[in-house]
């Protein structure tokens, strides 16, 4: 009789759980028998998808966290993909539900963060170790922009404490070989947060060459360095803790592949990659995909004659820049250089030119604004000057280029040789978004023949790459 009562209570509890969380929540697969702490003592095995859904249901109901009651005897199993051995992760475990990139609609490849008030977790839960996590009484929320499991009843997730974590998180006997998902930056989505990914044909942006991972004067808590794809030009930030053991190493100079955890920055502003250690970056190819550079330097001599001027006052707001010999070429995506005016904190200079990819929905946005041709053989002492401003540039960037062999045909733009005018100053993401920055008086005397100047934007519709760049007061002058 007692056995029947126990079975009845167990079935009733299970039905209550199903009725509370929806049709695809908290399924009950067969428990993993390899768990050192018997699965039968933990309750019912659920899925990462169910955890994600539970959190989303709470958000849909106006809450910031989802609480799992003590009566819900649920647990999950996953594989550890983070390691704090190099100090780049701290008091957290990142786990995913699969050893590779295989996925199904019923059980998609997903990850979770577990917040624990314990250091040196990799000594206990090494990379690839399959673990079991008892969920009863825990909380699901977001921490630094990614779904996190912890404790607490307030508006945010709190850490699991040292006195309890071994009872909540137990090891199985399995240590798996983890195969990262091979992807492109623009194909990564929120479903890839807290999972292991691999990117090929990557390099650090040329402006970060010579920098350390996280030991520069601007690095507080974390260092951010731009990684860019040599295939698409799309970029993403690498985030490195200033407490990591490799913070003082110089970033690799070459090109290659990187394996890292896809996440959000600690302020939840943009996507980042976080490596377990610097050995996960295999940039062992000496070649790079940087654009060619040409540097005539700056000059103090401003010619009295003007060859080209543009203040964009004749342009229309939110309309493509036209006229005055401009070529406004959209290489990728749906956005181009447009006219805009604003009196807000990020004010325009009257009317200016702007490129923004925010809300474009495009995986890549590349736009060129190219001047008409100039024959510099006929105009000695030529110089270029302009002003730029930005709004949260993030991983998007702007360049000023020149070509001495473009024939003026849009279809031939990418066939021409374009060189970066490296002496020109363009606003940086670390600059304030309020003022406008002068390019300096860029000397063009080392160029010859027919020349085009191009202002090129590279970004995407993704939050981490949808920054705004603004351009105004473009002048090309000459001495004689």
Image (spheres, rainbow, N blue to C red):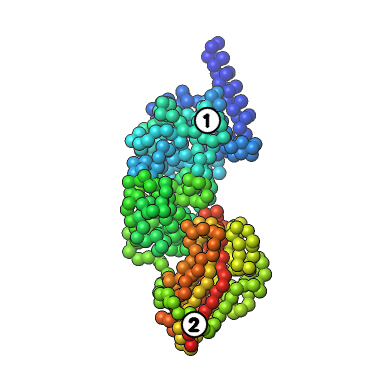
* Residue occupied by mark 1: 152
Q: Secondary structure at mark 2?
A: loop
Residue drawn at (37%, 35%) of the image: 119
Label 2 Cα neighbours within 10 Å, binned few <14 / some 14-19 / many ≥20: some
Viewer-closest of 393 and 126: 393
Query: How far across and how far down the image is residue 362, in percent?
Result: 58, 59
Task: Tell me the CA gap for discs 1 and 2.
Answer: 68 Å
Q: Looking at the image, can residue 299 be seen?
A: yes
Query: How far across and how far down the image is residue 247, in percent?
Result: 35, 50
- Which quadrant of the view contains residue 475? bottom right
- Which quadrant of the view contains residue 328? bottom right
Q: Is residue 249 above or below residue 58?
A: below
Q: Secondary structure at mark 1?
A: loop
Residue drawn at (56%, 72%) of the image: 473
Label disc, if present, on residue 341 of the rendered structure: none
Q: Extreme top residue here?
A: 1
Q: Is residue 435 above or below residue 40?
A: below
Q: Are marks 1 and 2 in contact (CB under 8 Å)?
A: no
Viewer-closest of 51 and 377: 377
Image quarter hosting the N terminus? top right
Query: How far across and how far down the image is residue 430, in percent?
Result: 47, 57
Q: Is residue 21 above or below residue 363?
A: above
Total number of numbered discs in the rendering? 2
Residue drawn at (56%, 68%) of the image: 471
Viewer-closest of 457 and 190: 457
* Residue occupied by mark 2: 303
Q: Is residue 60 above or below residue 32?
A: below
**Which of marks 2 and 1 precedes in the sequence?**
1
Label 1 Cα neighbours within 10 Å, binned few <14 / some 14-19 / many ≥20: some
Residue drawn at (50%, 69%) of the image: 438
Query: How far across and how far down the image is residue 216, in percent?
Result: 37, 54
Q: Nearer the viewer, mark 1 or mark 2?
A: 2
């Amino acid at each position: 009789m007692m056995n029947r009562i126990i079975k009845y209570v167990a079935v009733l509890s299970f039905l209550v759980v199903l009725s509370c969380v929806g049709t695809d929540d908290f399924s009950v697969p067969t428990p993993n028998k390899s768990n050192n702490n018997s699965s039968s003592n933990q309750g019912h095995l659920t899925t990462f998808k169910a955890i994600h859904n539970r959190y989303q249901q709470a958000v849909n109901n106006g809450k910031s966290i989802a609480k799992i009651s003590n009566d819900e005897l649920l647990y999950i199993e996953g594989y550890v993909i983070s390691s704090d051995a190099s100090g780049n992760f701290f008091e957290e475990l990142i786990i995913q539900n699969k050893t590779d990139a295989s996925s199904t609609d019923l059980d998609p490849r997903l990850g979770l963060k577990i917040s624990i008030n314990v250091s040196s977790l990799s000594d206990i839960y090494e990379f690839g170790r399959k673990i079991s996590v008892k969920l009863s009484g825990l909380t699901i929320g977001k921490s630094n922009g990614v779904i996190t499991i912890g404790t607490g009843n307030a508006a945010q997730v709190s850490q699991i404490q040292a006195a309890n974590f071994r009872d909540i998180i137990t090891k199985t006997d399995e240590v798996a070989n983890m195969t990262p998902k091979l992807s492109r930056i623009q194909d990564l989505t929120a479903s890839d947060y807290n999972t292991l990914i691999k990117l090929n044909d990557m390099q650090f942006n040329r402006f970060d060459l010579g920098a350390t991972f996280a030991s520069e004067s601007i690095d507080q808590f974390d260092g951010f360095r731009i990684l860019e794809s040599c295939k698409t030009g799309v970029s993403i930030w690498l985030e490195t803790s200033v407490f990591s053991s490799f913070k003082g190493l110089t970033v690799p100079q070459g090109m290659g592949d990187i394996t890292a955890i896809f996440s959000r920055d600690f302020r939840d502003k943009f996507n980042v990659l976080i490596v377990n250690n610097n050995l996960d970056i295999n940039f062992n190819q000496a070649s790079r995909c940087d654009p060619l550079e040409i540097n005539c330097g700056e000059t103090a001599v401003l010619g009295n004659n003007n060859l080209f001027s543009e203040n964009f006052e004749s342009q229309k707001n939110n309309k493509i820049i036209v006229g005055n010999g401009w070529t406004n070429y959209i290489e990728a995506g749906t956005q181009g250089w447009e006219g805009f005016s604003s009196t807000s904190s990020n004010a325009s200079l009257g009317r200016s030119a702007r490129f923004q990819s925010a809300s474009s929905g495009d995986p890549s946005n590349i736009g060129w604004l190219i001047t008409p041709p100039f024959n510099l053989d006929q105009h000695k002492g030529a110089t270029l000057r302009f002003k730029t401003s930005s709004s949260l540039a993030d991983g998007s960037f702007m360049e000023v280029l020149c070509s001495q062999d473009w024939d003026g045909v849009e279809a031939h733009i990418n066939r021409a040789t374009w060189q970066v005018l490296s002496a020109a100053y363009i606003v940086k993401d670390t600059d304030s978004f309020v003022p406008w920055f002068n390019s300096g008086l860029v000397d063009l005397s080392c160029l010859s023949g027919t020349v085009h100047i191009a202002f090129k934007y590279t970004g995407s519709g993704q939050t981490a790459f949808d920054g705004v760049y603004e351009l105004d007061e473009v002048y090309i002058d000459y001495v004689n």
